[in-house]
């Protein structure tokens, strides 16, 4: 200690230092990376690494127990002959096409209602956001299924108005709709974003249109919708991508076989079944990459169409 | 200051690296007691019993320590698959008959024939001897056995005026009994579930005809017309509204119709008797399986679960000792009762207190003892997948989404694809 102590100040002052900012020292960069290391390790080991591995595995026949065997594009080719894969694509496509518009319309409608000033507004907002907090929970899916069985709440209510469907959980014609409703019920996230968007719509525009004699619907169509179109687009993208990944609720309701009669065989469920029940990791990996490709293409398509209907204020058009 | 700061940085980074390193290593010291990892599937009830047995084992073998772990059945196999792939399988693991070949063929299980000194198999019930063998190697040891049977409510039979099933009844008798019961209650209680939903019913029919579900060389033991006959029986039962409608069955999952008093009886593994009896107040009995061939019930004692040792275990001898204790020790038999199926060895069976549903099961197995045949060879790789396909396709058929021919074609296509890969 005694011998090293006096040399310390020299070392510290021996470096060229600017008046305001401290100069970089050789060790600084290293220290920076060390501080970043938790994140870097996380992204390398837990995200990028597995992704690259799964891309490689998608070109192999890999049963978990034996070493992966290169098969080229075989897994991808097989999908198109696989009746269950086609079925799962169909189920997922129908779900996305129905659930996303239903959920967005419901979220927008609720947001419009909550945008008006009224007593207890905070309570209503919380109440409508509530279901989203319990999001993808297993218990919720179990309760939801119980609501839709024979002689349960929904069945009785429908019978009271003369509709006889039996429990939807066992009826192949309604099972998917039941999951659509579950999704729509959890409209909290898009609703909050819609609300924020609605706050941005200039009041002057509404007032001017009102003076000119425009009715509510006309004002909604011609002022509100165009003004919040970026928010609609954002929600549309987010919800579409989310809808492709439905898993928990569907797994609880339909199990690995997509009961009843394969009508809830979502893409993710089939993927999981192939990988973890049938031990076909190569095929499951290929399925995952096909899903990524599909969602990517649809996102691209949405961006293309957005040019036609999304209006950004300040946009000279 | 600067030095202090840098010192802290290095320290922080170093501790981080340590944390990472700590995740990787769990090597144990060479000296001291040997630690075995032991995994099984089951619920908390089983875990409590298991812990009792493990404590007993550790008292008797102070040089061996057991680290237990358990999951429910499906999660268990998912974890087992990934652990095994990562070279991290437990030393001793609970094995299912349907997965035995899958694992044994891939060389991840230890051949217990090499540990005959530590593991006694002589006391196994006659029907279970050789049950854990695959191609001459002993890759699993049965801990319990069960057999196919007919669980029914005698009250429901009496109410409908149908005589109770007895040895010698045929599949036609079974179908007409179900029809009479269903009709007599006006559909309030069904005579039974649709038996085409379970592929062991096909197996028992095949065995009654002297055939097998899977042949010795791991192929399907039946042809398309045979499966079409089976599916047609169920289709007719469903169309005539004799059996519990499929949409009911789907909605009550994971419960069973017998637990909810929705049906008068059901074919299934006899150890389910205990589960049913715990769920319903209705008195239940176990009767014989219907057969069109009086000389052949088609039944066998199936290993309800087995114990295996991982091929990578560093302590095969101690592992064999643990298995020996689990199957032979009478105290262990008394602890578990029929939790793992009725015990596989005579000594443990004698130690089990037989009362209530347990006594029913034991009496049933005793009554058909003479008719039980040798268990079939361990099913081929992918048998679990094929069973799932069978359940799914049968469900679609009962829903009327596909016809019998389409169902048969679909099953054979999927089975072929699974067996060849």
Image (spheres, rainbow, N blue to C red):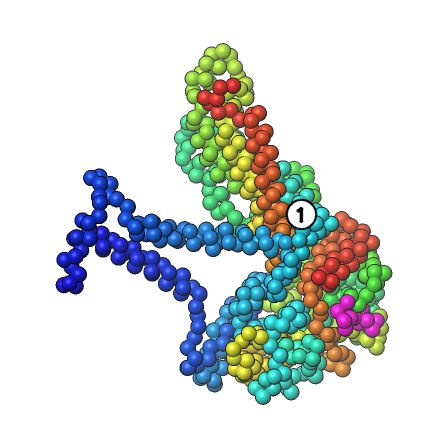
**Is residue A149 or residue B308 the one in the foreground?**
B308
Residue drawn where x is 65% and y is 87% of the image:
B122
- The chain holding disc 1 is A
Residue drawn where x is 54% and y is 52% of the image:
A52
Q: Is residue B263 visible?
A: no
**Is residue B109 or residue B261 the one in the foreground?**
B109
Q: Return the x and y of residue B372 as percentages of the image width and height.
A: 75, 78
**Is residue B198 or residue B240 the one in the foreground?**
B198
Which quadrant is the C terminus of chain B positioned in?
bottom right
Q: Is residue B112 visible?
A: yes
Give SS at disc 1.
Answer: helix
| Principal secondary structure, stretch drawn in magenta | loop
Q: Return the x and y of residue B337 as percentages of the image width and height.
A: 58, 77
Q: Is residue B221 left or right of residue B28?
A: right
Q: Return the x and y of residue A70 as percentages of the image width and height.
A: 65, 57
Q: Quadrant of residue A7?
A: bottom left
Examine the structure image and report whether residue B212 is included in the region drawn in magenta: yes
Q: Which residues lie in the magenta part? A: B205-219
Q: Quadrant of residue B144?
A: bottom right
B103 is higher (above) or lower (below) than B189: below
A259 is higher (above) or lower (below) than B346: above
Q: Is residue A43 left or right of residue B2?
A: right
Residue drawn where x is 50% and y is 73% of the image:
B37
Residue drawn where x is 52% and y is 15% of the image:
A214
Q: Is residue B21 left or right of residue B401?
A: left
Q: Can you identify the residue that label 1 sits on? A: A88
B130 is higher (above) or lower (below) than A87: below
Q: Return the x and y of residue B151 as percentages of the image width and height.
A: 70, 69
């Amino acid at each position: 200690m005694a011998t090293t102590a006096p040399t310390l100040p020299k070392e510290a002052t021996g470096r060229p230092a600017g008046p305001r900012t401290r100069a970089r020292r050789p060790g600084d960069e290293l220290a920076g990376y060390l501080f970043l290391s938790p994140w870097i390790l996380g992204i390398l080991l837990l995200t990028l690494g597995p992704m690259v591995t799964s891309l490689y595995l998608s070109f192999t026949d890999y049963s978990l127990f034996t070493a992966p065997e290169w098969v080229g594009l075989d897994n991808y080719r097989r999908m198109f002959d696989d009746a269950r894969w086609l079925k799962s694509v169909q189920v997922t496509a129908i779900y996305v096409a129905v659930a996303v518009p239903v959920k967005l319309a419901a979220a927008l409608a609720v947001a419009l209602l909550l945008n008006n000033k009224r007593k207890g507004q905070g309570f209503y907002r919380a109440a409508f956001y509530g279901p989203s907090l319990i999001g993808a929970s297993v218990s919720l899916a179990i309760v939801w299924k119980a609501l839709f069985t024979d002689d349960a709440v929904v069945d009785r209510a429908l019978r009271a108005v003369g509709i006889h469907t039996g429990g939807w959980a066992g009826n192949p014609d309604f099972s998917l709709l039941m999951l659509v409703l579950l999704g729509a019920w959890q409209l909290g996230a898009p609703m909050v974003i819609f609300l924020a968007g609605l706050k941005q719509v200039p009041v002057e525009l509404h007032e001017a249109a009102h003076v000119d004699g425009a009715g509510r619907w006309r004002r909604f169509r011609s002022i509100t919708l165009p003004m919040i179109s970026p928010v609609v687009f954002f929600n549309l993208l987010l919800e579409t991508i989310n809808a492709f990944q439905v898993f928990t609720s569907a797994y609880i309701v339909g199990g690995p076989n997509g009961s009843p009669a394969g009508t809830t065989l979502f893409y993710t469920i089939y993927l999981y079944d192939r990988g973890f029940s049938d031990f076909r990791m190569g095929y499951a990996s290929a399925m995952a990459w096909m899903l990524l490709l599909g969602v990517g293409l649809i996102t691209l398509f949405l961006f293309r169409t957005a040019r036609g209907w999304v209006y950004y204020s300040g946009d000279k058009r | 200051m600067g030095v202090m700061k840098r010192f802290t940085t290095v320290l922080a980074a170093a501790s981080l690296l340590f944390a990472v390193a700590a995740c990787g290593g769990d090597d144990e010291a060479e000296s001291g007691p040997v630690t075995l990892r032991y995994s099984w599937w089951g619920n908390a009830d089983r875990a409590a019993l298991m812990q009792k047995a493990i404590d007993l084992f550790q008292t008797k073998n102070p040089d061996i320590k057991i680290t237990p772990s358990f999951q429910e059945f499906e999660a268990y196999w998912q974890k087992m698959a990934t652990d095994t792939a990562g070279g991290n399988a437990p030393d001793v693991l609970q094995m299912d008959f349907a997965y035995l070949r899958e694992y044994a063929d891939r060389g991840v299980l230890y051949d217990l024939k090499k540990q005959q000194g530590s593991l006694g198999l002589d006391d196994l019930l006659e029907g279970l001897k050789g049950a854990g063998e695959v191609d001459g190697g002993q890759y699993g040891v049965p801990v319990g056995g069960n057999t196919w049977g007919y669980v029914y409510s005698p009250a429901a039979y009496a109410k409908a005026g149908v005589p109770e099933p007895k040895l010698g009844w045929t599949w036609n008798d079974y179908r007409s009994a179900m029809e009479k019961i269903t009709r007599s209650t006006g559909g309030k209680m069904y005579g039974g579930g649709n038996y085409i939903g379970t592929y062991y019913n096909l197996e028992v029919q095949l065995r009654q005809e002297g055939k097998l579900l899977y042949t010795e060389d791991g192929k399907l033991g039946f042809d398309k017309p045979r499966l079409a006959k089976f599916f047609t029986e169920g289709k007719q039962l469903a169309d005539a509204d004799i059996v519990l409608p499929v949409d009911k069955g789907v909605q009550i999952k994971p419960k069973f119709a017998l637990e909810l008093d929705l049906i008068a009886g059901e074919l299934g593994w006899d150890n389910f008797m205990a589960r049913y009896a715990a769920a319903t107040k209705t008195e239940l009995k176990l009767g014989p399986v219907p057969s069109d061939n009086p000389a052949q019930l088609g039944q066998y004692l199936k290993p309800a679960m087995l114990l295996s040792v991982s091929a990578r275990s560093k302590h095969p001898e101690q592992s064999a000792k643990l298995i020996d204790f689990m199957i032979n020790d009478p105290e262990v038999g008394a602890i578990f009762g029929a939790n793992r199926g009725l015990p596989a060895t005579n000594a443990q069976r004698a130690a089990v207190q037989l009362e209530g549903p347990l006594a029913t099961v034991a009496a049933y197995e005793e009554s058909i003892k003479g008719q039980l045949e040798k268990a079939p060879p361990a099913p081929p790789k992918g048998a679990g997948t094929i069973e799932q396909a069978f359940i799914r396709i049968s469900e679609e058929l009962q829903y009327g989404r596909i016809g019998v021919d389409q169902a048969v074609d679909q099953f054979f296509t999927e089975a072929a694809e699974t067996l060849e890969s």
